[in-house]
Amino acid sequence: MDMQLHRDKWQIHVKHFYEYITTRLLHEKTVRIAGINQVDITRDIGNLAHVHFAANMFSLPLKTAETPKGVFTEHELWMAAAVIFASVFHDFEPTKSHPLRKVARKLAQALGGLIEMNVKTVIGTSFASKLIDSYRESDNPLAAYGIHMIRALTETGMSAHELAFSQILPTAAAMIPIQGQVFTQLLDFYLGPGDQHLPDIQKWAALDTAEADDKLLHYVQEGIRLNSTFGMYRHANVEHTFEEYGRQIHVKPGDNVFCSFVDAARDASVFPNPDVVDLDRPMDSYLHYGMGPHTCLGKGMSQIALTAMLRVVGKLPGLRRAPGPQGELKKLPRPGGFYVYMREAQDSVFPFPTTMKVHFDGSVPEMPTTAKE
């Protein structure tokens, strides 16, 4: 019973945090041009909300108005995480591989070293560690969860260095860019080919009920299914030959096979009427969080976070793309239904979305009373 209560509190804290930080970022980043509100929903909202979550959860050295002595600004921390992740999973260009890995290594050493220092203050018993620990925000539940997580991991026998570089850094580096990408992809869908569903999303966003949460979560799941780019490596257990993209592929037992979820997410045998948004699909039919032992450990947190963000953005009156190229998500196709995205100056590409501007009328929703309820 205590474990269930703890889990329920965690869900409430994550929901409140993302509603709070999304609203706060909208207040900070929105500009008014000729009587119209404009905000870069990707660069300044979708990407940065997860930066703030990771910074609070793992005590990352984020530099803000409240913490001017931090090391990384919001955008710097997002870029650091994105580059580290890209060097592992998106190192596709041989001519750019060396500089990418060189920069990623430098960033990983810097950020990992700072995380290691924080870990040492959490698990340390020295007077200095206790003094630093006494200055942590005792009313910040996310920081408290992070501290408990670190102390629990130390029971495995890992050192502070191992904890920082093999557990916390990889988790933060993956979570920040991936969750930002997913939010942009689902919003790009509902401001594009799925825009007929936007009025219903806005209707449910205005209601703070369990039913509204459920409806918005299903809109999140369907938006990700129809417009996201996910995949997973699996080991083949049997020999098989099949045709894909016009070529014969022979797989032997033990081969490492990349399975794209882009086509699988539109498999009519699993998703009847696969091109249609259906809010009644079973929640366990979705693939984008992995399956079985490969299920993403942050699945529950991600669903709550994205639902909370969609609720806040869905409240914006007259939400629409900014006119012209600035309102488009510029992307170039890659094999298997994947994409790379144009940078804001459109002079280079990046594995993750970096810009998509929207307009809305009226005013930004009022700030929640607190993020720490």
Image (cartoon, grey):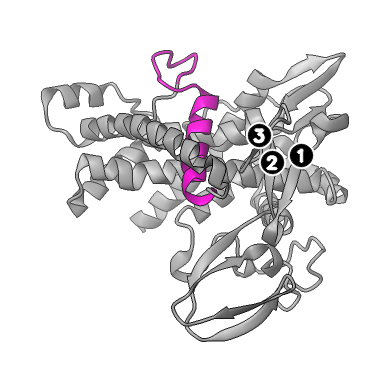
Which residue is more in the foreground, 137 or 47? 47
Residue 274 position within the rendered picture, expressed as x and y whole percent measured from the top left: 78, 68
First-in-chain label (1 vs 3): 1
* Within-10-Å neighbours for mark 1: few <14, some 14–19, many 20+: some
Task: Name the residue carrying label 2.
Answer: 341
Q: Residue furthest bottom?
A: 239
Q: In the rendered structure, are the residues bearing label 1 and label 2 in contact, judged by CB atoms less than 8 Å apart?
A: yes
Query: Callout 3, which amino acid?
Result: Thr
Q: Which residues are magenta?
A: 63-90
Q: Residue furthest front?
A: 95
Residue 257 position within the rendered picture, expressed as x and y whole percent measured from the top left: 53, 70
Who's the residue at 54% across and 63% down the image?
A: 232
Query: Callout 1, which amino acid?
Result: Lys
Who's the residue at 40% across and 56% down the image?
A: 4
Which residue is more in the foreground, 338 or 360? 338
Residue 296 position within the rendered picture, expressed as x and y whole percent measured from the top left: 48, 58
Residue 75 in sight in this render:
yes
Q: In the rendered structure, are the residues bearing label 2 and label 3 in contact, judged by CB atoms less than 8 Å apart?
A: yes
Task: Name the residue carrying label 1.
Answer: 330
First-in-chain label (2 vs 3): 2
**Which mark lies nearer to you, 2 or 3?**
2
First-in-chain label (1 vs 2): 1
Query: Callout 2, which amino acid?
Result: Tyr
Residue 61 position within the rendered picture, expressed as x and y whole percent measured from the top left: 39, 25
- Is 32 covered by the magenta stretch? no
Which residue is more in the foreground, 230 or 118? 230
User: Which mark, by number, is residue 354?
Assistant: 3
* Residue 128 higher or lower than 169, as above or below: above
Q: CA distance from mark 1 to mark 2?
A: 6 Å
